Amino acid sequence: MATFLYKLGKLAFRRRHFVALIWVALLTLAGVGAASAPTAASSSFSIPGTEAQKAFDLLEKRAPEASADGASARVVFKAPDGEKVTDKANKAEIVKTVGALKSGSDQVARADDPFKAKTVSKDGSTAYASVSYKVTSMELTDDDRDALEKTTDKARESGLTVEVGGDALQAMPETGSTEIIGIAVAAVVLVITFGSLIAAGLPLLTALIGVGIGVSSITALADALDLGTTTSTLAMMIGLAVGIDYALFIVSRYRGELADGRDREEAAGRAVGTAGSAVVFAGLTVVIALVGLAVVNIPMLTKMGFAAAGTVVIAVLIALTLIPALLGYAGKRVMPTGEKSRLFGGGRKKAAEGAGGTSGEPKPNMGTRWARFVVRRPVAVLLVGIVGLGAAAIPVSQLELGLPDDGAQPTSTTQRKAYDLVSEGFGPGFNGPLMVVGDLKGADDPKAAAQRIQKKISGLDDVLTVAKPMLTKAGDTAIISVVPSSKPSGVETEDLVHSIRDTGAQLKSDTGADIMVTGTTAMNIDVSQKLNDALLPYLALVVGLAFLLLIVVFRSILVPLKAALGFLLSVLAALGAVVAVFQWGWLGSLFGVEQTGPIMSMMPIFMVGVVFGLAMDYEVFLVTRMREAYVHGERPGQAVITGFRHGARVVSAAAVIMIAVFAGFIGSSEQMVKMIGFGLAIAVFFDAFVVRMALVPAVLALLGKRAWWLPKWLDRALPNVDVEGEGLRTEAGRGPDVDRELVRV
């Protein structure tokens, strides 16, 4: 592979006009496609195989007018102090508002008058109107949400307190400002790393081109492939991070080859042949992790994974072709390692060297000094690292998973205010009523069966109220609303859902009716369960495939095993930090956490998928340099130091960039986005700076030559991908490789 990529890099360098034209054409084509594509409706959210989804599907078939899985809004009215909502003026205003809600949008299926629906609190201070939509919350347009907000704003003018809960106002949070923060930090880090604006600008430029092509392609295909607005979010975040990293690896190696005295075309070829090999395999691990999300069998998550994987593939191709082409355009403005432009003091350094500089060995950098310390004290470093990560992982033992409801929203939002008003006036369970659907086709007496179901559920623990059964026109399906005593995200409510489902077998034998529990609360419980069940198979698939891939890359058993174990340790530590901050509330005010609660059920599997792929980037790039030095004759301990001398600075810069991109999302007002940003940022920090920078060299120093052991039969069976570039010595033998003059910097 190294030889093929070496030739590809030289070809791209020589034919830079053609290569640049191809990528500009692709960007233009994707942009035109995105601009001319029809506006895609938001992708529908479905969870195949869950009971809640089966109930929704049954109602869609037998009672489509009910819009059971449609968006909902709960408009809560609270009378001024000393008044009641039943007072004449207040009642008239509420009835008028309900009428305006019905006519405000074509998507409104119904809006219930609280006085007819009897949704008025016992003390008469609070009432709420339930609004149901024909489409899901993800399919509502901005106009639909604006109509809801304008109607409630007008009602407030009468003196009533009016707040809106439910998922109708739920919209994807804006992320533009966070991406700008990430790019700004990346620019600063790149300038510090390279000491040159041109060299720093190349990774940023190519990353933006790659993300532009990827996101534009997603937008162009959104309508045809039913891709929602959420699909491009992960693709943009991952594409930006890996795009900068991969380009950083290539440019850094190119400058190192220039420092070794090679001409620019040869340096470009060698950079792509060596660092490019690491980029290819690092990209493959990310793709495996993202595509593996299909194991969860949640269509929206699968589409997000495939879209992000496509963007990663584009980032790899750009690093292998466009980067060497742009290096050709840059010419001498991209300088060898150690040299800086005049703007960053390069001229002064050269003058000093000319006056009295020496031509001895360059001064060891921080990476070299750290690696020497670790090689001398591997046991101490290993113990400190493992104990530290182990301590951070302790909170995982108290991990509680769930999906956030309006109770997790910031206290300043209307959703949270509506949630609190309903809890105070009616009870916390009214914020998440359950919908029990009875399939009465097998019942001899459907009406009696529905009443029997109602009576049975009324006798269960944690049930506050059970509404009278509503039968469809055909009389073959019953809908029963059940209000729990506990809040929607409470453990008691989850137990109640399971209790209702457990009674299903007995009710079927007694009445012949099948019952299913659905609604937003039940759907959240089912999603959490599905994600929990998929975590171990997903982890086994992703880590297993990546383990096999890394065996091919490193031609070793112990190095991939160490990589996988180190990753698991960093993810557990990161999850522990998430639990401590978002569930326990430690340092919560520092990160803007207003309400503690269960950790989002998607968090573990999301972190495994994203962080594993990104963590392997650092593993592959750092350890391939060690492997390369070892294959070229260095002792194991010295190979570790050599790998750090060349790779530590670049890996550190890449990790800081990645952390900056993810940490920017901590500032979001959405608790879920804040949690994802914090979790990914802290996971990258643990993995890059503790596992890869400390534990990896310590383990390799302890193992010595045993680290690179591979059974002979397996060595013969594995393909030789030559990541360390051994084949380039033969290729370079045709050129002035041996007698080249070293450039001292």
Image: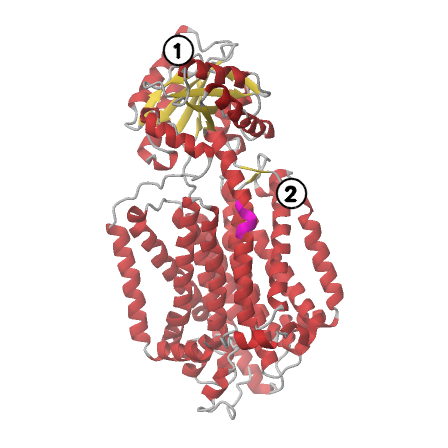
Residue at figure coordinates x 42%, y 33% from the top left? 54
The amino acid sitting under disc 2 is Ala
Residue 654: where, in percent of width, then height? 53, 63
Residue placed farthest to the left in the image?
36
Magenta stretch: dominant SS?
helix
Residue 99 position, x and y percent, is 32, 17
Residue 92, quarter of the rendered image? top left
Quarter of the view holding residue 450: top left
Residue located 58% across and 34% down the image = 595
- The residue nearer to you, when weighing 105 against 283, is 283
Above or below — where is 355 with respect to 228? below
Please, what is the three-letter code of the amino acid marked with disc 1?
Answer: Lys
Q: CA distance from mark 2 to mark 1?
A: 46 Å
Quarter of the image with the N terminus is bottom left
**Residue highlighted by disc 2:** 580
Q: Secondary structure at mark 1?
A: helix
Decide which of 540, 645 is in the foreground and name it: 540
Q: Which residue is mark 1?
A: 116
Q: Could you tell whether 131 is left or right of 685 in the image?
A: left
Give the vertical position of 234 relative to 8 (above or below). Answer: above
Residue 219 in the image: above or below residue 93? below
Inspect the magenta stretch and tell me whether residue 728 lies in it: no
At 62% from the left edge and 74% from the top edge, which residue is drawn?
A: 711
535 magenta-colored: yes
In the rendered structure, which segment of residues is drawn in magenta? 534-538
Disc number lying in front (2 or 1): 1
Name the spot of residue 141 as percent of width and height, x first. Answer: 32, 35
